[in-house]
Amino acid sequence: MQINDKSGVKHYLAANSRYESMTYNRTGKSGVLLPAMSIGLWHNFGFIDPIQNGRDILRTAFDLGITHFDLANNYGPPYGSAEENFGTIFKKDFQNYRDELFIATKAGYDMWPGPYGNLGSRKYLISSLDQSLKRMNLDYVDVFYHHRPDPDTPLEETMGALADIVRQGKALYVGISNYQPEETQKAAELLKDLNTPFILHQARYSMFDRWVEDGLLNTLDKNGVGCIAFSPLAQGLLTDKYINGIPEGSRAAKDLTYLNSETVSSNLDKIQKLNKLAIERGQKLSQMAIAWILRQPQVASVLVGASSSNQLKENIKALDNLNFSEEELKMIEAVIS
């Protein structure tokens, strides 16, 4: 909703009903509740994208009760631009709502030239977060992640940097992303010894990518850490976009490394069968795919991207039907296993 001040300038006013229909889940054994669906700024928020569209998406998200906004230092393109655009939007629309928001950023992938702009050194993590806070117009983030394991830096150094970031007041909690179960266990033990609140593991998880079920979810459960799933729609495969082939202008039509025509054709039979099951549940395929991930008790939230407010509103309808019968789960398993 927009209101005009005395000078006629339009200001954003969040919907009074924003907490009425959203489901909130506890994150591991922490005190944090996350919305079952969170908004990721990986795509559609860089300098190549219209900022007003990004602004509309974030306003819609918050009006729907989505309190968690997820970023990383290198989201864009170019690197840093998603954080910078978010900072501009935050200053205009969300400053008054800072204490209602749970904002995340990450560091771990290539960010700037030279030996200190990548991976997991203390130098990189602390410098990166300082830059991120400036870009986002924030004093602190709610959670700061190490974005991927660094095979060449001792885990003690990386986790020690995360612990110091919390002590410095630059992050309230820490997380890791893309870590395997064994690495996750070691990280959890180090952070526990450092008395650092480790609450989230961000992992790729979808019906077509189930690696987290091979030990990671159990490891998180054992350590009281929540999971937040990204790429729940397998980059668009688990939507109705590709049911009748590859539309012009779609991601698969561009033959990107993570989604190409071969991936679509090899999964088409599964996509069509899953779509039929979703229709029988009264859902779109994308909505069923999100609900299917949220059935896991360790999953606190599912991260979705959105290219428009309308797409976000469609995805959030997944929360209208989160229950699966044993029969439905067996049928889904028969298709995807």
Image (tube, helix red, strand yellow):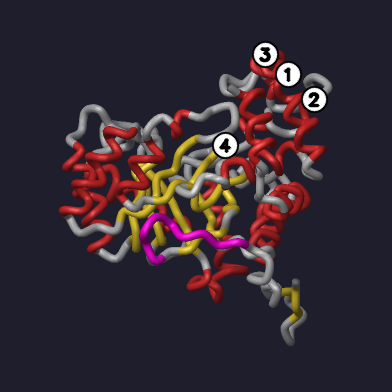
| Image marks 1 and 2: residues in contact by CB distance under 8 Å | yes
**Where residue 323 appears, x then y in whole percent?**
66, 49
Residue 24 included in the magenta stretch of the image = yes
Q: Nearer the viewer, mark 4 or mark 3?
A: 3
Position of 198 compared to 241: left or right?
left
Tag 3 secondary structure: helix
Let me know if residue 111 appears in the view: no
Magenta segment range?
23-31
Residue 208 location, quadrant: top right
Camera-side residue: 123 or 303? Answer: 303
Q: Residue 268, which numbered label?
A: 1
| Image marks 1 and 3: residues in contact by CB distance under 8 Å | yes
Position of 305 compared to 272: left or right?
left
- In this rendering, the answer to whether 181 lies above or below 169 is above
Q: Residues within 10 Å of mark 4 (few under 14, many from 20)?
A: some
**Where residue 134 appears, x then y in whole percent?**
41, 58
Residue at (43%, 51%) from the top-left corner?
Answer: 105
Camera-side residue: 39 or 314? Answer: 314
Residue 279 included in the magenta stretch of the image = no
- The single residue placed furthest to the front in the displayed view is 326
Q: Nearer the viewer, mark 1 or mark 4?
A: 1
Tag 4 secondary structure: loop
From the image, tell me which residue sits under label 4.
231
From the image, tell me which residue sits under label 3.
266
* Quarter of the image where the C terminus is located: top right
Tag 2 secondary structure: loop
**Where residue 313 appears, x then y in whole percent?**
74, 53
| Image marks 2 and 4: residues in contact by CB distance under 8 Å | no
For the residues labelled 3 and 2, the Cα–Cα distance comes to 12 Å
From the image, tell me which residue sits under label 2.
243
